[in-house]
Image (spheres, rainbow, N blue to C red):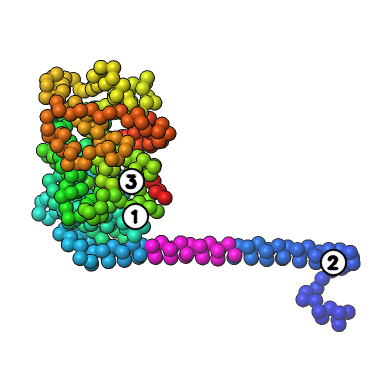
């Protein structure tokens, strides 16, 4: 007994001794234990693989993001260091935060970033535009400072400075107290503050600005996004063209622009039809002429009236205008009550007629039938009685007209107020 008890750590009774296992039970328990261990190992292995894969994927995305921004910054830095003859001042991002009081007062938001009100140390008020979604190589930023940074015209917004601080990019522009033109066209309360004299003054100013871009510089500048949202108004309602993110620069000796394998973007309702369907014609400065014509139509109110007429809700709106003319009906323009007196006088009627006819010339489907901006100015500043209404383009193929109308001309089922942008790939 003493010899057998020596292996026990403490005295045990007979009842406490382990019950002998059968030969059948012992292997079964061992196999269960092995299965549990194998299952845990598989789960643990999958978890490890998932975590490693997730970390690798995140590291790759961070690497690509940083590499893209470094490449964009390198492209911008290279442009700024080249002989671009920029006159605006370069600011740091901390400077922008100071002049805007940490971006406290937001003026608006567009497709390329947000705009804030700022104040320079000199007391001069400015609009600070922070570029948000950057395109490849920071092309929008380069377009902006590469165009308005080197030109000066009373009807083109003045670039005061810019910021190119690593991934932060911004533009410092002259502050326009009266905001953008779209707020007066699409807002009934503010529309009453624009009589026909001011509307005509704005139309003339925008036309002069576009003419300067096309033929007043040592290089031809095509804006490609003329619309009420990109026309700013100073305290005297002098219009200033802004937002050159889509602009294209080319030699004054060339009449057309090569758009092969290039993405051309514009705003629904204002983009020229040849940018959508290349069968219509070649892309040139006439694209801006088309957009200006659509802007005139909005200013005289033709588009708003057509949108409010349910019977003509699906009609291509130039057809609607020609129908009114052929029936001997006037193009009735609904204005605010405060402007009724101005509508009755001959000056208001003359301005309305002139802007409508010039607009019809500008929105001709075939680019070759549209006048140049120089000719547009001659028509606007000349005698309205000598203006002839262009012939109805009935020779156009219905398919092409319908396609262009659905994309860029039919205002009856497009929402202009949001200034939505589209991107069109030209192959």
Provide the residue designation for mark 2. 27
Q: Residue at x 29, y 24 (%)?
A: 322
Report, in whole angstroms, how far the alpha carbon at label 1 lies from the one at label 2. Answer: 67 Å
Q: Residue at x 38, y 36 (%)?
A: 404
Above or below: residue 159 compared with residue 40: above
Above or below: residue 91 compared with residue 330: below
Report, in whole angstroms, how far the alpha carbon at label 2 lies from the one at label 3. Answer: 85 Å
Q: Residue 326: horizontal and vertical position, in percent?
A: 28, 20
Above or below: residue 229 compared with residue 167: above
Instruction: Pick the residue in front: 329 or 32.
Output: 329
Query: Callout 2: helix, strand or loop?
Result: helix
Q: Residue at x 26, y 64 (%)?
A: 79
- Could you tell me which quadrant the N terminus lies in? bottom right
Q: Residue at x 83, y 63 (%)?
A: 28
Q: Residue 49: horizontal and vertical position, in percent?
A: 59, 65
Q: Earlier in the sequence, mark 1 or mark 2?
A: 2
Farthest-out residue, top: 328
Report, in whole angstroms, how far the alpha carbon at label 1 lies from the one at label 3. Answer: 28 Å
Total marks placed? 3
Residue 15 visible, this angle: no
* Mark number, residue 134: 1
Q: Is residue 14 magenta?
A: no
The nearer-to-camera label among 1 and 3 is 3
Above or below: residue 182 compared with residue 345: below
């Amino acid at each position: 007994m003493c010899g057998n008890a020596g292996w026990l750590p403490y005295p045990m009774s007979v009842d406490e001794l382990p019950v002998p296992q059968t030969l059948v039970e012992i292997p079964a328990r061992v196999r269960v234990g092995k299965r549990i261990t194998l299952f845990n190992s598989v789960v643990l292995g999958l978890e490890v693989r998932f975590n490693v894969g997730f970390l690798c994927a995140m590291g790759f995305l961070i690497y690509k993001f940083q590499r893209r921004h470094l490449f964009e910054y390198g492209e911008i830095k290279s442009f700024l260091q080249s002989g671009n003859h920029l006159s605006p001042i370069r600011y740091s991002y901390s400077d922008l935060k100071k002049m805007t009081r940490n971006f406290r007062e937001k003026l608006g938001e567009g497709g390329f970033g947000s705009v804030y009100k700022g104040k320079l140390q000199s007391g001069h008020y400015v609009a600070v535009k922070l570029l948000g979604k950057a395109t490849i190589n920071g092309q929008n930023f380069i377009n902006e400072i590469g165009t308005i940074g080197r030109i000066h015209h009373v009807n083109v917004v003045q670039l005061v400075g810019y910021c190119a601080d690593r991934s932060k990019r911004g533009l410092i522009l002259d502050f326009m107290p009266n905001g953008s033109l779209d707020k007066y066209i699409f807002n009934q309360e503010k529309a009453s503050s624009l009589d026909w004299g001011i509307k005509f003054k704005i139309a003339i100013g925008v036309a002069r600005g576009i003419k300067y871009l096309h033929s007043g510089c040592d290089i031809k500048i095509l804006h490609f996004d003329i619309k009420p949202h990109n026309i700013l108004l100073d305290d005297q309602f002098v219009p200033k063209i802004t937002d050159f993110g889509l602009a294209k620069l080319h030699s004054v000796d060339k009449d057309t622009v090569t758009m092969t394998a290039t993405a051309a973007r514009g705003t629904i309702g204002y983009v020229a039809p040849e940018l959508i369907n290349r069968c219509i014609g070649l892309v040139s400065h006439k694209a801006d002429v088309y957009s200006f014509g659509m802007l005139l139509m909005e200013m005289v109110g033709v588009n708003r009236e057509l949108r409010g007429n349910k019977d003509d809700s699906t009609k291509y709106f130039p057809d609607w205008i020609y129908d009114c003319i052929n029936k001997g009906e006037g193009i009735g323009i609904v204005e605010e009550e405060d402007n009724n007196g101005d509508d009755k006088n001959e000056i208001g009627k003359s301005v309305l007629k002139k802007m409508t006819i010039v607009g019809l010339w500008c929105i001709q489907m075939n680019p070759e039938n549209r006048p140049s901006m120089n000719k547009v100015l001659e028509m606007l500043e000349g005698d309205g009685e000598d203006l002839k209404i262009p012939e109805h383009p009935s020779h156009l193929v219905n398919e092409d007209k319908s396609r262009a109308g659905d994309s860029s001309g039919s205002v009856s089922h497009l929402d202009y107020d949001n200034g939505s942008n589209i991107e069109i790939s030209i192959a």
